[in-house]
Image (spheres, grey):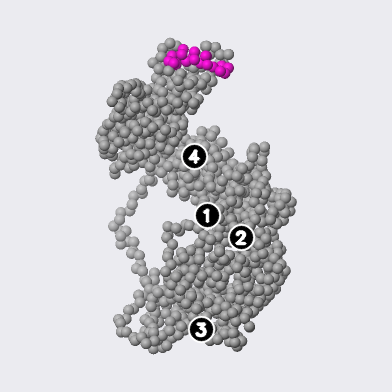
Amino acid sequence: MPALGSDMDEGTLDEWLVKPGDQVTRGQIVAVVETTKAAVEIECWQEGTVSELLVPIGETVQVGAVLATLLASGERAERRPRRKPRPSKPRAATKPAAAPSSARGAAVTPPTVPQRRRWVSPAARRLAQSLDVDIDALSGTGPQGAVIISDVEHAAASKEPATKPMTKPMTKPTPADRGAQMRKSIAAAMSRSKREIPHYYLADNIVLENSLSWLTARNAQRSITERVLPAVLLLKAVGLAAQRFGEFNGFWREDGFVPATGVHVGVGISLRGGGLVAPAIHDVPDKKLDELMDDLTDLVARARSFSLRSSEMSDPTITVTNLGDKGVDAVFGIIYPPQVALVGFGQPAQRVCVIDGGIRVVTTVQATLAADHRASDGHRGALFLNAINELLQQPDLLEK
Amino acid sequence: MKTTYRTAVHDAIRDALRDDPRVVLMGEDVGRYGGTYAASKGLLAEFGPERVRDTPLSELGFVGIGIGAALNGLRPIVEVMTVNFSLLALDQIVNTAAALRHMSGGQFSVPIVIRMATGAGRQLAAQHSHSLEPWYAHIPGIKVVAPATVEDAYGMLAPALADPDPVVIFEHVQLYNTSTDIDALTPTDISRAAVRRNGTDVTIIAYGGCLSKALDAADELSLAGIDCEVVDLRVLRPLDNDTILESVSKTHRAVVVDEAWRSGSLAAEITARVMEGAFYDLDAPVARVCSNEVPIPYAKHLEEAALPQTVKIVAAVKGLFGDRQ
Amino acid sequence: MSTNEDTRGVVLSVLTTIAPEIDPDDIRDDIMLRDQVDLDSMDWLNFLRGIHRRLHVDIPEADYASLRTLADVVGYVDENASQPGTGGH
Amino acid sequence: MTDTKLAHELLSDMVRVRRMEEKCAELYSAAKIRGFLHLYVGEEAVAAGSLRALADDDAVVATYREHAHALLRGIPMASIMAEMFGKQEGCSRGRGGSMHLFDASRRFYGGNAIVAGGLPLAVGIALADARLQQKRVTACYFGDGAVAEGAFHESLNMAALWNLPVLFCCENNLYAMGTALERAQSQTDLTVKAASYRVPTLAVDGMDVEACHTAAQQGVDHVRDTGGPFFIEFRTYRFRAHSMFDPELYRDKAEVEQWRERDPIRLFSEQCRHDGTLTDADLRDIENSADAEIEAAVAFAEAGTWEAAEDLERDVLTPVDRRAAVGEATPEPAR
């Protein structure tokens, strides 16, 4: 059955104009085929003798089916089992009718009117999951009562859903309210961390001479608004190292560790009057020191005026805490779930060190790593801390 | 110095004619008349009838001729007076200009620029008030831009002419008389959307004649404590996904403003892309402010009612903030 | 020209924006500031930046160490102020 | 006819086209070629006679029935056949198919499958030539169906108004698909229509290859001398259906048979034999050489490769690295 057009799939044989034994020539009309458009004459492209007509009149066959066989001159007919071309698929009319609905319908109890699915914005749903907030217990304040980001944030801060519906009007909470809510939320997160996360701890003394003298020289050329704090160098070093050691940058989910795509470093910021937040500085490895300094300044200011953005709260992929200003030598932190690592820095101070076999007084800082043993092992943790150390020996690398 | 959109368009064409002898301007009444919107006033005298060609009223013909001339070494700027007349030339734009490169297996590029006025707002009634930009933005093989500012009215022509593929420029009729303080006009780009106002609470996405309405709405909303980011699409094809998604991911809410009719509009396309690319960042459904689905009527109050307006944008934005309002 | 008293007032007002919980009347001129107010290095930097902004004194990093008490800061500012004071704000 | 070499070339061109088209019909039935397929059988004298009148750097704009024009303009048959197979070795990389054969190097601006779509394009190409001061001709082929389109009116008007070097070649085969000329046109003498735009015209027997050649030469000379347009109506006939899926309900078999009596190949070979410029052996050589060319072309197309589907979206816009090349070679127009 020749293809007679791009929209032709099949044809019905209307008429044979030749019979077995007839001689045919190239270009001769040998049959008439009915298509969806009209009856069309079929040309033969070969010369020879008709051997067998394989498709009877009235049969519909697919394009490409053999209609007849020809013998070239001198060729002899071969007796072979006659293969009928596959008839075209049955038309829709022959399809079995749909089963009567009563057959199955009787067994099914009429469905109860389902409650409307709770409206939760996609962003709020994701945030609730990462903050471990029970969405069903929230009342929404979004359009048509949808639960939105701010509802989840409030709930995460208070962490006491369900029992008391949120009756508070949209008045600004007092600092005391905030303090109480934050205390509860820290309590919940840290308890969960210590309950669920098998922490391991490593520490490393890092000599800061190179970094600090480099930074002092850099700052000396700048006005006060452009100077960079040593904390920014530490932040950048952690960010770069976390990029290289992916198993410390990401989240522990139900199914196991899920590495994060970017490195968003949560910065522990203590609040005046107590409490702690650790909002993210996004894409730390990609930012220049000046950008990081601007981000940090901005973040601290906003953290202390309670105007953080939700994404900053939910985005950190690893956390850095710096208690050096308070004079402690080292901090062994608690991981903020679902993150899997936290790097702590103590006070940079002059300490006696053995360097190259000699005793010297140099400025050092103690860096610590608290890491989730489900996601990584101490060996990798040690390499991760070493990487931070090495980066801080070459402050040029941190500039970019 | 105050510069109008009209002057910016005019100066862009004049500078293009000066800078490149391959550039010709053709269209209905671009020469002696000086252009329907006076965008080519004086250019016939300066560059002569070979380079500033008045054409007969034959949109299909002269757009096709522009395409042929572009294929053979010229850089034509073809002015089709208004988008409604461009329907007469749609065959040449879609079947030839947009398809030629592909169906020739990459052998022929068509470096033509087609300009036309678009949009409603001047009581010109049903046949002279269309915003058919979404139709053009649907077609692979052409680029579509909509300068909404005086800077872009000047700045987009040079990169459009430098582009080896067909570029269609839509100038909204309401913009020709707008003006801005500008020292010097320079080429811009035809690749990215622009954030015209930074904000944190909601992204308003607009283009062409609706940009100023979106910015007005943002000003008004700021008094209500809603901090709007306003994105000017600038390029309608190919759309700048990154800028749109980055902004919506930040603000978690989006309102798309489009003077075209809602069904099958660019607003529909952008909404779909936000859903595909930023669904989990959304804190509310995407809202649209488009023209009502009616041929644009003549009577002023009805025309105003049919089109996107600042007050409608404000209402759409507020609708995305439940109890807070 | 600014007077010593003006400068002290401005410095204290900068300090209270950084640490809103303090009562300026409680701050003693001759006791280490960091012992009286909870200031970390970011707060300290912001404090010096505020002084820079309000009193137009740029303090090199090398001089940070000499600024330990309120009196140190006020004295430093009066000595290095290059612009007319902003007293009367 | 005294020029034996020219006679052999004209005959050979027509035979190559005829045999290639018949092979295409066969390959279509075998589903090697798909899509729409419009054959030129019966009209060979028009392309063979007219294209020969063009110089190498003239331009050609053709229709969706353009295999003959592509072949006789010099695109290798193998490259045409590969295109119809959809292979990336085809002259349009398999992106065009039968209706969209292109070759930039031969200034062959392609098969255009929108009726009359090529006319404005040809006028624009000529406009650029005029402006760039190139004494080149753009030959624009179209059928009688195109005359009914607005683009015909607009293009002839502007070509005449602006005096642009276009040779309009109307291949009048009496049917716009299935609609006979007298059922579509109030004025069936198409030269009268063209003349109304003050374009000089000529009508010629499209079954007579020598007449086609002479008329085309006259038209080309006029265009080159005056820089203005010229219109030729080639009165011809297609022997086969409009496309492969056409039951030909609109015309009598007797009419087709009558026209077959004036088969341009038969007419011309009989005339040459009569003149003594063609022997049986010559004809056999011409046919054998055409068959060999076709066999090689089909083998080339069969051996061709499919473009990787990952490259689907190439050639929609010009890639950055090839942007500089667009329009680079064009001469500077006068200011």
Q: Which residue is mark 3?
A: D284
Q: Are marks 1 and 3 on the same chain?
A: yes
| N-term-proximal mark, 4 vs 2 | 2
**Amino acid type indicated by mark 1:** Arg
**Amino acid type indicated by mark 3:** Arg
Q: Is residue A228 above or below residue D287?
A: above
Q: Are marks 4 and 3 in contact (CB under 8 Å)?
A: no
Q: Looking at the picture, tell me which residue is in the foreground, B234 or A100.
A: B234
Q: Which residue is mark 4?
A: B202
Label 1 crowd bin: few (<14), some (14–19), many (20+), radius 10 Å: few
- Find residue D322 and name its label: 1
Q: Is residue D289 above or below residue D163?
A: below
Determine the chain carrying the residue at label 1: D
Determine the chain carrying the residue at label 2: B
Comparing marks 4 and 3, which lies closer to the viewer? 3
Determine the residue located farthest toward the front in the rendered image: A357
Label 3 crowd bin: few (<14), some (14–19), many (20+), radius 10 Å: few
Residue D112 lies, in percent from the top left, at 56, 66
SS at circle 1: helix
Which of the 4 image quadrants contains residue A145?
top left
The region drawn magenta spans C66-85
Quarter holding the C terminus of chain A is top left
Residue B10 lies, in percent from the top left, at 67, 47
SS at circle 3: helix
Q: Looking at the picture, tell me which residue is in the foreground, B213 or A322.
A: A322
